Image (cartoon, rainbow, N blue to C red):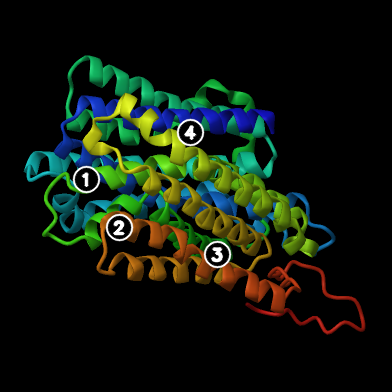
Amino acid sequence: MRALSAATLVVAVSGYAVIVVAGRALDTVSYEAFSVFWGLFFALAGLVDGLLQETARSVAARRSPSGRLLPDAASCARPMAVALGFAVVVGALTVASAPLWSSAVLPDDRGLEVSGALLMAVGLASYTFQAAVCGLLSAATRWSAFAWLISVDSAVRILLALVAWVLGWHLLAFLLVTVVGAATWLGFLLLVPAQRDVLREVGDVPAAEFVRRTVKAMLASGANAVLITGFPVLLSFTSGSGVAPGALAAVITAVTLTRAPLLVPLQRFQPALIVHFTRHRDRVLQACAAPAAVIVGTAVAGGVAAYWLARPLMLLFFDAGLVSPALVLALLTVASASTALLMVTGSAAHAAERHSLYLAGWAVATVAAVALLLVDASPEARAVLALGVAPLAGVVVHLGVLVLRPQLPTSPRSAATPLPRAGSSGRTRRR
């Protein structure tokens, strides 16, 4: 886990560095467009992370069945094969939907819109395989390999961003920087053949059930990503057409930077949380207590530090027009705890095989966030309300159902599974 901790530091620092370099290299309008494109890509990648999460849960459950009867391995899902199907669908949908979003995300430049849409499609298709590989490595508890993979992913982006800055390249280069790390999985498997055996791992349910659960996990993780990396896109779309170009740049920068210390590491630790909760399915609520306490304490301390230090530090790297007031930075830092808590309770619900509950909590939080973003207030106030209050509604949903219905469902069985012993009902509770 030391390797994973080091990797999260690399990811967080690289994310900061790319944003700083982009702020230096691009004018305000281009920087805002880059920020929205960056947010959209990682929001959609976050949706694909549902495949990572279900792969980690399913394969970990297969490797540690805890006495449960499981279907024969030959009839169970192979995550890499499922990833191929999802990659085709994700790439095709991205291209097909491009006319709906490309002109709103990128400046009024037809060539840039087409290039951005193609980069988005290829990047997301590649990331689908990366998500499956990360899930397999997590289930196998190969944390060092997982750490190397996500570290290289992030390091590649900052290196290319620095090259683009030095050479004077503009917005298109930074769009490429955004998506290029999604191909890291391919280089990793080519250069580290000892890790290729994880590609043969199977899950604990048949392929059709695996896909169904993955879709639910994707919808939930997509809502997760909307509230984290995709929040700039949500803020931009809910602000209406009356907002001048570049007017949201400061609050977008504040949201992006204040969430990073807590949420970026937690996103990288989420597979480990799912594996941990999967191994403690019999006491999943108790297993939430320690992570929740750490999150609250870190957010409060971070908010105090942000009030006094964040603005002076940001002024060293950004123009004054991109730096929000100290109180806004402090409140946004504390608000990040709400989303972090929702990530923990969501991971617990997922590990407990409450996929519908997992989705419901994130759906409630997203709807609440959109509603709060539509209130008549400044962009800063709307951002604080949406990020600080809305996720707590999802936490209440997750914990409420887990408290009221703590017993775990039985995993689906295939026809090849042995029959129950005499005297048992043989009935399986369905979700």
Q: Which mark is residue 213?
A: 3
The residue type indicated by label 1 comes to: Ala
According to the image, label 1 marks what residue? 117
Residues at marks 2 and 4, CA–CA distance in whole angstroms? 22 Å
Mark 3 or 4 closer to N-term? 4
In this view, the residue in front, 378 or 112, is 378
Q: Residues within 10 Å of mark 3 (few under 14, many from 20)?
A: many
Task: Tell me what residue is drawn at x 31 percent, y 42 percent.
Answer: 324
Q: Which mark is residue 12?
A: 4
The residue type indicated by label 3 comes to: Arg
Residues at marks 3 and 1, CA–CA distance in whole angstroms? 28 Å
Mark 3 or 1 closer to N-term? 1
In this view, the residue in front, 388 or 347, is 388
The residue type indicated by label 4 comes to: Ala
Name which quarter of the figure residue 351 lies in: bottom right
Task: Tell me what residue is drawn at x 68 percent, y 58 percent.
Answer: 204
The residue type indicated by label 2 comes to: Leu
Where does residue 58 sit, x and y in percent of width and height? 65, 55
Q: Nearer the viewer, mark 1 or mark 4?
A: 4
Relative to residue 247, is residue 130 drawn left or right? right
Residues tagged 3 and 2 counted as in contact (Cβ below 8 A): no
Where does residue 234 sit, x and y in percent of width and height? 30, 57
Q: Which mark is residue 284?
A: none
Quarter of the figure that contains the N terminus: top right
According to the image, label 2 marks what residue? 234
Vertical placement of 358 versus 74: above or below?
below
Residues at marks 3 and 2, CA–CA distance in whole angstroms? 26 Å
Mark 2 or 4 closer to N-term? 4
